[in-house]
């Protein structure tokens, strides 16, 4: 029985990973073909790093991910605080529902809805050149917000009121109590919200697809354009790099870092 | 107690959303005293404690500390520290930093902090635990850290909000003894909140019995136990047989169809009263020698005594006796004048019946929220 | 805390403003565009013209349903077996489930295409062996395969999480009460992991029904799904209105199906198509 279970696990994971392994393996294939393997080579990596567009889009992706996740974290953390302290159940409920819309909706609907908003605004302003970094930033902050609130809110809810009271009892002013006792309890939620937002933003293709312009391309958009027509082996190289980067991050977070432990012990 | 008054509550009332929690409380607490606020859940004891701690502002009345009104003084400026119900240890700080917290806020020099924390850890028997995470400690150890964290600030008063509630019985008994020792050693006034009457009796200098937002009685444990003010106090503290009686004249009271000699006087003639007789104060005698006669309806072995329920003309008495009595036997009951305590009628009269449906478990089942508050 | 200070009460204000501007308004614009013509006049013509897209909807729903069911059939036993491995192995398997989730969808789809394409590895191998080529890319099967491949981890993760949260005492208790292994499965484990199944279903169904990249790549542009249609209609300003109408209908369809599904689960959590992604890395 145990053997059968293990075989099943191995089989499914094998099927799941064969395409990725093939992709990585052939990114080192000199021939630039899936039909024949002529030898190990870094030629496709060289081509990738020689491609100005690829490097620009990587930089764009990072700039967008950092700025959108930071903005979303600031707005979202304050929102979680405000919503937590809010008395009116009705307002709280409707704000939560609205916030979660981008999370529930298919990305394509979120994408086109934001595009329509920008189109309408552009129409009012009489401009046609409206898509770019600004619209991307707005869109990314918007879809990051629910994730930040989702990570921070439980921390506020789990806060023991008597912690703040204990701090005041021991001589803290109310604001000292917030910074010395409550904030350290919330920080892990803020950090995971920030990281979540950062990765969601790096990863997003569909929403960006509708609110971007050729002037400001992110990495996923670059991959999309590059893979639109023919097979490009420099894209194999890029994909291999991304997969390996993510693998390393996941391994570090799950096995080495105390960060994973902290997150787990909530 | 001849010590100085430390805390005075005068006409203190508190209500939440129109629901009265405290109803015009007057209370004096003196220096070096171990005071226990005792009562069932919802009686207002925790609210009283939080008013003294500064976490709750009363709607009416004044709170004095050393004769000065402190109604508007925030918690962090009061010379009072609290041991919270679930300890409220700071999870991001280790044992040392938790205990040092108050001193750090006061910007005490590092050297002094180290010394005092060490002293405190010795006092609560936690030497060597400095670097431990607080969530790795057992309930009893967390309790000790919470006490050390409060005491290190040398407060004039230490407030303890049901601190032993989460501990098991054995640990609880040990902590009772230790708390008492710490109180004597430091000379700090302790105000202790509990719903456990045994805990209150064994630890306190003064017990304040509370119910329904009012103080029912203030006194030493002996006084509270032996001379309860009303039926509520009699019922809440220890086991008691509470009967309706009539004071015929001074030292003469009639109940259960018999006239008894008692030690109470100064009641109006024919005044209706409540009578309390403790189970251990009733002697089992032969039928012909008894003042009352009854049939034994149950016998329970309790280790050093038997607890028996006796039906006397339809009223079930509880008795504690060291001699075995057979169920269904008919026995006589003898009550000494000193064993009879006469109380004025109160709003609680008649609320506490006899022992006809007595069971420890039933009592708990009937009050599922006992552990709350 | 006694009263929230002014600051605390206003803390949510920027977010509320943002949500109105960039969540509520865009939704209103979808509605507006769906019910107006190109000149901005009120019109039902977009909605009525949707009948010509009926087959696209049917095809999309069918594909998404098939992919979801197969993901469940593969994923449920997988999650169950995974939960029975040693804690260390579970941790490693968790990473293996999460890795594809954190890789961009484009990359995963592209990798699958590299394997299955006419000039791909599979067909090169078959050719070398002297066998007939399999044309998978460009067929319905290829698109469904792509959905299963891309979204299987989204099914496995929430079910696996629910499995690991299951107290083994329940299983022991059911055995103690006379359940066979199968009865324990159907009467105890399945009901207790239902919430995981529901979120798994949502997390596979929603992206499947709205995808356009998978059908572009693995359908080789020959298979038109709702996502492709929307994407195409939004290339050209003159068809924004019809595109908005289709988006609206899809949104309503999804809201209805998610609501129905959540009825089956006691879990009050919103059907969250992506939460597993974040939920995985920092549980």
Image (cartoon, coloured by chain):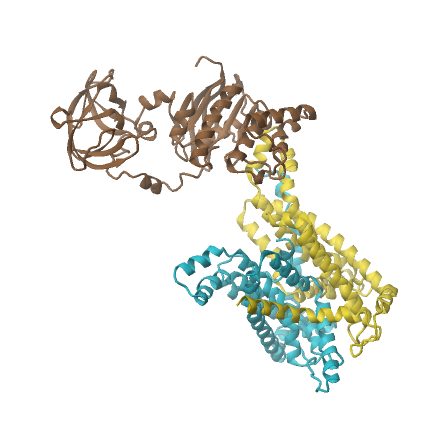
Q: Where does the image place residue C166, in percent across and percent down from the top left? A: 51, 57
Seen in the picture, residue A24 relative to B359 is either above or below; the reply is below
What residue occupies the far left of the structure in this picture? B288
Instruction: For the N terminus of chain B, give its image quadrant.
Output: top left
* Left or right of residue A28: residue B279: left
Which sits in the foreground, B186 or B77?
A: B186
Quadrant containing the C terminus of chain B is top left
Give me the residue at 42% from left, 21% from top. B206
Q: Answer above or below: position of C197 versus B8.
A: below
Task: Determine whether, in the image, residue C202 is placed left or right of residue A230.
Answer: left
Taking the view exactly as shown, the residue that stands out farthest to the top is: B2
Quarter of the view holding residue B351: top left
Foreground residue among C23 and A38: A38
- Reply above or below: A91 against A46: above
x, y percent for residue A26: 78, 72
Which image quadrant is residue C251 in?
A: bottom right
Tell me what residue is drawn at x 39 percent, y 60 percent.
C177
Task: Answer yes or no: is residue C13 visible.
Answer: no
Q: Based on the displayed image, in which of its 4 quarters is residue C111 positioned?
A: bottom right
Residue B247 visible in the displayed image? yes
User: Which x, y percent locates residue C191?
Assistant: 47, 62
Marks counted in the figure total 0
Q: Colour of chain B?
A: brown
Question: Residue C252 vs residue C243: left or right?
Answer: left
Residue B74 picture location, percent across and down: 58, 28
Q: Nearer the viewer, residue C255 or C70?
A: C70
Image height of C29 relative to B25, above or below: below
Q: Residue at x 61, y 45 (%)?
A: A82
Tell me the yellow chain.
A
Could you say which chain is coloured cyan in the image?
C
């Amino acid at each position: 029985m145990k053997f059968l279970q293990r075989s099943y696990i191995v089989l499914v994971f094998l099927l799941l990973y064969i395409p990725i392994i093939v992709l990585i393996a052939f990114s080192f294939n000199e021939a630039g073909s899936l039909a024949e393997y002529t030898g190990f080579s870094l030629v496709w990596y060289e081509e990738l790093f020689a491609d100005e567009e690829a490097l620009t889009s990587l930089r764009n992706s990072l700039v967008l991910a950092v700025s959108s996740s930071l903005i979303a974290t600031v707005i979202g953390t304050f929102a979680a605080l405000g919503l937590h302290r809010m008395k009116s159940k009705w307002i709280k409920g409707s704000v939560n529902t609205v916030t979660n819309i981008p999370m529930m909706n298919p990305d394509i609907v979120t994408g086109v809805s934001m595009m329509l908003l920008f189109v309408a605004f552009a129409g009012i302003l009489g401009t046609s050149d409206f898509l770019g970094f600004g619209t991307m930033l707005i869109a990314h902050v918007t879809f990051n917000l629910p994730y930040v609130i989702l990570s921070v809110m439980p921390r506020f809810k789990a806060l023991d009121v008597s912690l703040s009271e204990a701090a005041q009892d021991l001589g803290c002013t109310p604001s000292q109590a917030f910074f010395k006792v409550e904030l350290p309890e919330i920080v892990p939620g803020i950090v995971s919200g920030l990281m979540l937002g950062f990765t969601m933003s790096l990863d997003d293709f569909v929403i960006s697809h509708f609110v971007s312009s050729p002037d400001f391309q992110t990495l996923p958009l670059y991959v999309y354009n590059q893979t639109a027509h023919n097979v490009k082996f420099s894209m194999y190289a890029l994909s291999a790099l991304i997969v390996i980067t993510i693998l390393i991050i996941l391994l570090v977070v799950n096995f080495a870092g105390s960060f994973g432990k902290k997150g787990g012990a909530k | 107690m001849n010590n100085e008054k430390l805390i005075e509550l005068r006409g203190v009332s508190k209500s939440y959303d129109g629901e009265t929690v405290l109803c015009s409380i007057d209370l004096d607490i003196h220096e070096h005293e171990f005071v226990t606020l005792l009562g069932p859940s919802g009686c207002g004891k925790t609210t009283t404690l939080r008013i003294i701690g500064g976490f709750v502002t009363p709607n009416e009345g004044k709170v004095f500390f050393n004769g000065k009104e402190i109604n508007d003084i925030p918690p962090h400026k009061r010379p009072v520290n609290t041991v919270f119900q679930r300890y409220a240890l700071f999870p991001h700080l280790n044992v040392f930093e938790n205990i040092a917290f108050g001193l750090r806020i006061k910007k005490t020099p590092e050297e002094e902090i180290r010394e005092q924390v060490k002293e405190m850890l010795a006092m609560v028997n936690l030497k060597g635990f400095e670097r431990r995470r607080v969530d790795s400690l057992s309930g009893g150890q967390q309790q000790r850290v919470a006490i050390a964290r409060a005491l290190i600030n040398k407060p004039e008063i230490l407030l303890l909000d049901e601190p032993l509630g989460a501990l098991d019985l054995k640990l609880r008994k040990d902590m009772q003894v230790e708390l008492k020792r710490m109180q004597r050693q430091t000379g700090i006034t302790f105000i202790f909140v509990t719903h456990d009457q045994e805990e209150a009796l064994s630890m306190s200098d003064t017990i304040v019995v509370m119910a329904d937002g009012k103080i029912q009685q203030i006194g030493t444990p002996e006084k509270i136990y032996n001379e309860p003010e009303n039926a509520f106090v009699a019922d809440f503290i220890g086991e008691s047989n509470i009967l309706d009686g009539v004071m015929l004249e001074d030292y003469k009271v009639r109940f259960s169809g018999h006239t008894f000699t008692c030690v109470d006087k100064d009641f109006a003639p024919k005044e209706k009263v409540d009578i309390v007789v403790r189970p251990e104060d009733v002697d089992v005698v032969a039928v012909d020698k008894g003042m009352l006669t009854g049939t034994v309806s149950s016998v329970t072995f309790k280790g050093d005594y038997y607890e028996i329920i006796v039906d006397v003309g339809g009223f079930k008495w509880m008795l504690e006796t060291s001699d075995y009595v057979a169920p269904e036997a008919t026995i006589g009951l003898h009550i000494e004048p000193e064993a009879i305590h006469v109380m004025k009628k109160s709003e609680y009269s008649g609320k506490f019946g006899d022992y006809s449906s007595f069971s420890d478990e039933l009592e708990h089942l009937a009050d599922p929220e006992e552990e709350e508050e | 805390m006694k009263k929230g200070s002014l600051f605390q009460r206003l803390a949510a204000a920027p977010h509320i403003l943002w949500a109105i501007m960039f969540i509520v308004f865009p939704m209103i614009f979808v509605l507006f565009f769906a019910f107006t013509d190109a000149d901005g006049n009120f019109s039902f013509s977009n909605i009525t013209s949707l009948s010509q897209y009926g087959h696209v909807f049917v095809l999309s729903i069918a594909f998404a349903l098939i992919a979801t069911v197969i993901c469940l059939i593969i994923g449920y036993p997988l999650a169950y077996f995974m939960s029975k491995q040693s804690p260390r192995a579970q941790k490693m398997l968790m990473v293996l489930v999460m890795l594809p989730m954190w890789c961009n969808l484009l990359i995963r789809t592209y990798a699958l295409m590299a394997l299955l394409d006419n000039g791909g590895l599979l067909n090169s191998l078959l050719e070398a062996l002297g066998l007939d080529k399999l044309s998978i890319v460009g067929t319905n099967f290829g698109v469904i395969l792509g959905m299963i491949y891309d979204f299987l981890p989204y099914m496995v993760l929430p079910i696996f999480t629910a499995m690991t949260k299951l107290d083994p005492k329940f299983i022991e208790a059911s055995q103690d009460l006379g359940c066979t292994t199968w009865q324990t499965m159907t009467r105890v484990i399945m009901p207790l992991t239902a919430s995981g199944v529901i979120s798994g279903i949502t997390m596979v169904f929603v992206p499947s029904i709205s995808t356009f990249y998978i059908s572009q790549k693995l359908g080789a542009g020959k298979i038109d799904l709702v996502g492709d249609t929307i994407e195409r209609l939004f290339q050209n300003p003159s068809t924004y209105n019809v595109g908005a109408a289709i988006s609206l209908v899809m949104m309503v369809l999804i809201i209805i199906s998610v609501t129905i599904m959540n009825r089956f689960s006691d879990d009050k959590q919103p059907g969250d198509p992506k939460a597993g992604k974040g939920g995985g890395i920092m549980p």
